[in-house]
Amino acid sequence: MMAGSPASLSGQDVGSFAYLTIKDRIPQILTKAIDTLHRHKNEFFEKHGEKGTEAEKKAISLLSKLRNELQTDKPIIRFVEKFVDTDIWNQYLEYQQSLINENDGKPRWFYSPWLFVECYMYRRIHEAIIQSPPIDDFDVFKESKEQNFFESQESLIALCTHLQELRTTIEDLDENQLKDEFFKLLQISLWGNKCDLSLSGGETSSQRTNIINSVEELKPFILVNDMEHLWSLLNNCKKTREKASVTRVDVVLDNSGFELVTDLVLADFLLCSQLATEIRFYGKTIPWFVSDTTVHDFNWLIEQMKGSNHKWMSKCGADWENSIKMGRWVYHDHIFWTLPHEFCVMSQVAPDLYAELQKAHLILFKGDLNYRKLTGDRKWACTIPFRQALRGFHPAPLCSVRTLKAEVQVGLQPGQAEQLAASEPNWMTTGKYGIFQFDGPL
Ligand SMILES: O=P(O)(O)OC[C@@]1(O)O[C@H](CO)[C@@H](O)[C@@H]1O
Ligand SMILES: [Mn+2]
């Protein structure tokens, strides 16, 4: 770690959002996961017979043990089940141990960095499942991700209709009109990030209002607005690009369901406006933070759209399946995104992924967890520059597109944080405020 990184957010700070997440929300998420397994008992029996019933019992006992360790602040234990990242995880546990002097004992839930213990919790859920064949491919969060999609139908139809109408007129738009449409879809993708099930402790958080009409009224809640940088970067690429050359935008995805559709609508627009020629999506290899997108969620959602009885939704689904088939959209899986590491060490821990990101002209990082990893989930002063908090992580021009759900925020104006805190003490954790925070080859 470079000198001068402040301390990590952790459960040591009683009453902090990190503390309340570890104390209240994470056990709630575990309890919902156990309940989900209970509710699938018959399905497991129908599918696998006695072995299915035994597996369900084993997974539940493993998750109950995990919940007990967490609630009694037991030491964090090593992973035992063979998986592609088991050794990297156990190395990281050793690293966390090395940070603690001997009289402070072992890494623990209410002592170690919040980012580490929260990621560890989701990876332990995965271990419990892979230790319980034949239900070792079960996604305990699948139901809530699907429910989010189904409950957001009205907004999704409005969004798909908006995109299809835009596509018919896009050739006639002048640069300023194109910029306005770009900014509108960027903001819809930003506010789509409010729909996040781990913040709500797994309670439903679907999009019920028509998000397009609320873009204007939500503008004052954007605390850092670097959308102009995104426009000038991509519009310049478009104007200076040779005929056959590529402009690639990478989207590091966050939540499935409604948020994912806002990201795919934005990606569709980037291609048909020719602001980009290729989009690369990064999802999660294992079920993660309840609502995060896996490849199964990605494919399921496109299938659902294709099969919709609403013509514009099914048109979007068909177009998006085609974009994948034509290689204009590429879905990329990498285990790094479900490791606990801050992004400033990616070039050492996952050099192949870092090299891949370096090929992008712009990387959009969706959501709060990505922001926490970009900044290391540390106690930075709100006014330090975003570039400083990145601590050398500059694979390509990048932008965080994030609603605030954790007590870390940098790059604000002097006095801005104090002003917000005066009117809303919880401004950092309600998901009500958002940012477009850019770091480029300045
Ligand atoms: O990355 P996302 O989906 O925007 O948010 C992730 C999150 O919901 O999980 C943690 C709370 O449990 C916080 O980091 C944040 O609120
Ligand atoms: Mn998420």
Image (spheres, rainbow, N blue to C red):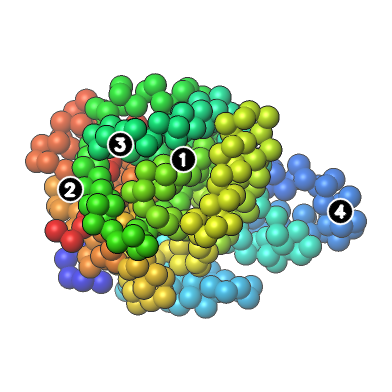
Along the polypeptide, which appears first: circle 4 or circle 1?
A: 4
Say which of marks 4 and 1 sits in front: 1
Q: Which mark is residue 265?
A: 1
From the viewer's perspective, tell me whether residue 76 is left or right of residue 235: right
From the viewer's perspective, tell me whether residue 108 is left or right of residue 311: left
Say which of marks 4 and 3 sits in front: 3
Along the polypeptide, which appears first: circle 3 or circle 1?
A: 3
| Amino acid found under the numbered disc labelled 2 | Gly
Along the polypeptide, which appears first: circle 2 or circle 4?
A: 4
Q: Position of residue 207 (x, y in %)?
A: 50, 29
Report the residue at 64% width, 73% height from top: 81
Q: Which residue is mark 2?
A: 411
Would residue 366 be visible to someone looking at this image? Answer: yes
Report the residue at 25% width, 65% height from top: 394
Q: Position of residue 379 (x, y in %)?
A: 24, 53
Q: Mark 1 to mark 2: distance in Å?
A: 28 Å
Q: Mark 3 to mark 1: distance in Å?
A: 15 Å
Who is closer to the viewer here, 171 or 202?
171
Along the polypeptide, which appears first: circle 1 or circle 2?
A: 1
Q: Which residue is mark 3?
A: 178
Q: Which quarter shows the C terminus?
A: bottom left
Q: Which mark is residue 38?
A: none
Would residue 17 be visible to someone looking at this image? Answer: no
Q: Which residue is mark 4?
A: 47
Q: Are the residues tagged 2 and 3 within 8 Å (C-beta)?
A: no
From the viewer's perspective, tell me whether residue 53 is left or right of residue 35: right
Q: Are the residues tagged 4 and 1 within 8 Å (C-beta)?
A: no
Q: Are the residues tagged 1 and 2 within 8 Å (C-beta)?
A: no
From the viewer's perspective, tell me whether residue 112 is left or right of residue 32: left
| Amino acid found under the numbered disc labelled 1 | Val
